[in-house]
Image (cartoon, grey):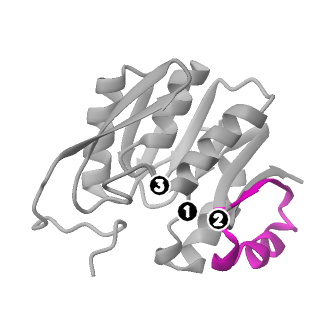
């Protein structure tokens, strides 16, 4: 079984297009084999983006999308909020698609390869992630716990996790680093934001 966080150079390419609409904005995304949710916008990612756009009251100048896949979350938020975005993934094909999609959707964004925060040098107002649960709890916690090193002073991390994929235990793990808040619950998905404590 090939995972979306592994690089398989031999995997056949079968480009496809996914269209997403948010209010007056229409987005086109190139997708392919070997990336997360290749045939449709993942429900958890969509819920995270739409909840963020509805509930966030902070002024956002820049954001970081960790484990960006083909770039859905970072690109939509960059366009709707008119802010700059950085989109990172460990998967080369995901980054290649994201670069295509940044151009296609004309947003102020950049994308590069990074294993979690390995190649990240800036700090951000928001870090957003739909963490790769199948990569294991250790990776998920690394993404969430180390985010605070890359957030501006008032910055927040927003993420989505399913109740049955350990939402409660992950929240407990974050208590010592963050003030956490469950912003939305829907179809077993939790949308959570966390601010440095």
Report the residue that reaches farthest toward the front: 187
Residue 126 horizontal side relative to residue 38, left or right? right
Question: Residue visible at 55% across and 46% down?
Answer: 46
CB contact under 8 Å: marks 2 and 1: yes
Alpha carbon distance from label 3 to label 2 = 12 Å
Q: Residues within 10 Å of mark 1 (few under 14, many from 20)?
A: many
Query: Badge 3 local density, few (<14 within 10 Å), some, or many (20+)?
Result: few
Q: Quadrant of residue 179?
A: bottom right
Identify the residue position indicated by label 3 in the image: 42
**Percent coordinates x, y for residue 111 in the rendering:** 38, 39
| Mark 3 vs 2, N-terminal side | 3
Q: Which residues are magenta?
A: 161-186
Tag 2: Cα neighbours inside 10 Å, few (<14), some, or many (≥20)? Answer: many
- Nearer-the-camera pick, 116 or 58: 58
* For residue 37, above or below residue 173: above
Circle number at residue 161? 2
Name the residue located 58 percent from the left edge and 53 percent from the top edge: 129
Residue 177 occupies which quadrant of the picture? Answer: bottom right
Q: Which residue is mark 1?
A: 131
């Amino acid at each position: 079984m090939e995972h979306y966080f592994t690089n398989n150079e031999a995997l056949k390419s079968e480009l496809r297009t996914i269209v997403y609409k948010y209010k007056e904005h229409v987005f086109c995304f190139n997708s392919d084999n070997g990336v997360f949710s290749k045939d449709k916008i993942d429900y958890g990612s969509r819920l995270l983006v739409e909840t963020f756009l509805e509930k966030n009251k902070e002024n956002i100048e820049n954001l970081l999308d960790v484990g960006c896949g083909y770039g859905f979350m970072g690109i939509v938020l960059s366009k709707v909020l008119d802010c700059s975005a950085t989109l990172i993934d460990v998967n080369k094909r995901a980054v290649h698609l994201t670069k295509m999609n940044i151009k296609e959707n004309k947003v102020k964004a950049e994308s590069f390869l990074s294993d979690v925060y390995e190649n990240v040098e800036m700090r951000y107002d928001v870090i957003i992630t739909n963490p790769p649960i199948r990569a294991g709890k250790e990776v998920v916690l690394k993404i969430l716990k180390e985010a605070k090193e890359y957030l501006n002073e008032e910055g927040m991390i927003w993420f989505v996790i399913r109740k049955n994929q350990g939402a409660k235990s992950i929240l407990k793990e974050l208590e010592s680093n963050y003030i956490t808040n469950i912003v939305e619950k829907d179809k077993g998905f939790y949308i959570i934001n966390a601010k440095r404590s």
